[in-house]
Image (tube, rainbow, N blue to C red):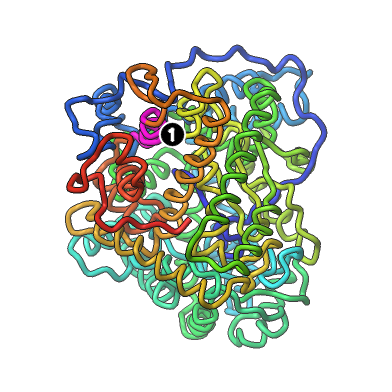
Amino acid sequence: MSRFAVVLSPSGLALIAFLAAAPLFSQNATPSAPSAPELRVFDTSLIDKNVDPCENFYRYSCNGWFKRNPLPPDQTSYGRFTELYELNRLHLKQILEESSKPDPNRTPNEQKIGDEYASCMDTANVDKLGLTPIKPELDRIAALRSPGELPVLLAHLHTIDVNAFFNFGADQDFADANQVISYYGGGGLGLPERDYYFRTDAKSVEQRKQYVDHVHKMFLLAGEPEAQASKDADTVMAIETRLAKASLTITEMRDPQNLNHPTDVPAMAKMLTHFSLMDYVEATHAPATGKANDMEPKFFAEFNALVGDTPLDQIRTYLRWHLLHAFAGTSMPEAFEQESWNFYAHTLNGAEKQQERWKRCTSRVDREMGEALGQVYVAKYFPPAEKQQALEMTLAIEQAMGKDIDALDWMSPATKIQAKEKLKTVMNKIGYPDKWRDYSKLVIVRGDPLGNQERVRVFDFNRDLAKIGKPVDKNEWGMSPPTVNAYYNSQQNNVNFPAGYFQPPFFSDKEDDAANYGDMGSTIGHELTHGFDDEGRQFDKDGNLKEWWTKDDETKFKEKAQCMVDQYDAIEAVPGVHLNGKLTLGENLADLGGLWLAWIAWQDKAEVAHLDMSAKTDGYTPDQRFWIAYAQQWCTQTRPEQLRSQAQTDPHAPDEYRTNSVLQDLPEFAKSFSCKPSDKMVSAKPCRIW
């Protein structure tokens, strides 16, 4: 699970948009809450006083949590975020179980989420149906008889979220963030990202063999003979390797300049000589004219060549695999779901046990109809007073950033003016949307889990494409209200904090400001800093990709950022695998900048309150409580396989380094615990930008 995110919309990582609706739930849908485990923002029982805080502050703050929380077999990692996520999932389960009762008084949205949950939970029916629900799609692929038919077929597969060949959708224009245009991006890979196809170390070679074996087993489950399944798996790997070679790396995709290639639909259609883009666009019911963004020209040149020289039977094989891959979850018989879990969760990330069915089904409904489910969650678990507290903390952190910008010794007055203008225009979205999404056109049929999944995907796809050519709606959300996460949107210049996050162990009105600011305050600061990290700083206050820095300031920023690239490049996450300092740069800058902003904001509050900084609570001074609360939010057990995958694919560093590496750069931390310059928690060359 991602913990904190920056959304760069045209990267294809977040095509986020949600519409409005009337109230969704009747008064009788109010199940009693499950008894909550004891979760605290600041918890002395988690501290290990046998560890010197100046040697390893993460272990000092978290060893007690590790002893109390062995890694569950169904998790690839388990931490404070997981604790709250699982608690929220219990709340959602009760809502869904109540809604799944066939009560004639259910509201339309209660019927949808309840029947979808009931359909997902009915494993006997899923297994009984077998491949029958997906057979029409398999037949559609088998009926492909000429390359000229591929555009219409691929358009259909994309509407049901089959990730074949490339990605297509609606997103904001880099040059005019107020407008939505078409975008085309690379895709079509079954491994997590492009470099999985090319790393030459023994583990990576083994994983590629395991992937081919996985594809082979899926074809066998679909009824192919052994020899054919083996041949087809090799075909899939060959096509995907070719696509991967032409794709941008995940590090290259972090720079928006690499993704900005404006064109228009007819011009792009002329470039694709072996694939009728006009037929594809017509089949998706998207506009056939207007501005578009060809995010990866090199990729589409290779895609065009591939379509022109690849035998049709191989293209059918590739499409068949991605169809099976796209639905091999709770909608398919257990053997498919188990095989998919075995490769992606067990082999790649080390999970030892599949999660219980109710957990998978609850998460599925949250993904599919998050705002229908989220509205009743908010009514029960996020009162207006908590929303106001969250907003007040956010405003305090923004005020602290204004002070920080004024105090920077490396930034010119001209750039400072622009930076503060951008800060002033940040939109704060707290808890849940002002208007709820309208699901009235979505049809959910009890007992038809795969059909439901298809209809949800078509609903989302059509809704997304309907935005092309229209102004951006900045009030839409990219996460459901119960989500334990947050994000910053570069092109909308807004910070987003779902309701599910504002509770222990991250925030509590029963805790002092030191703990709340060290924990939730650092998260708010983190998202705000994303507007000024190596990606976010390239967008102006209106969300346009536009140069607003002086050249000298830009050079100074890059020099300072290189300090953090080098710092994280040196970290060996697992034997033989180092972190990628460029990949994690934005998150590392946000971690450090966010904690610093929270510190400034808390210091201001403490000064106004005339807080006695020498007085101890639970044995710790206020500033010590601030740092411990920051560290304790990251207490996490992680499997070695997951650490390896994270180091190779995730822009977030592992949690131990999100704690220690950040604190090593802050002399204020060292002062609070009387650390000496020679101690491990004190950097000889601390990094600092914001």
- x and y percentages locating residue 379 in the rendered image: 69, 23
Relative placement, left or right, of 28 versus 34 is right
The magenta stretch spans residue 634: yes
- Residue at coordinates 43% horizontally, 52% vertically from top-left? 222
- x and y percentages locating residue 19 in the rendered image: 76, 45
Magenta region: 624-635
Q: Amino acid at mark 1?
A: Phe
The magenta stretch spans residue 513: no
- Residue at coordinates 64% horizontally, 40% vertically from top-left? 395
Query: Quarter-wise, where is residue 263 in the image?
Result: bottom right
- x and y percentages locating residue 121 in the rendered image: 53, 28
Quarter containing the N terminus: top left
Q: Nearer the viewer, residue 155 or 607?
A: 607
Query: Quarter-wise, where is residue 53 in the image?
Result: top left
User: Element under label 1?
Assistant: helix
- Residue at coordinates 57% horizontally, 62% vertically from top-left? 12
Label the magenta part by its dominant secondary structure. Answer: helix
- Which residue matches tag 1? 81
Query: Quarter-wise, where is residue 66 in the image?
Result: top left
Residue 158 in view:
yes
Residue 171 in view:
no
Q: Nearer the viewer, residue 439 or 477?
A: 477
- x and y percentages locating residue 54 in the rendered image: 23, 38
Relative placement, left or right, of 566 versus 610 is left
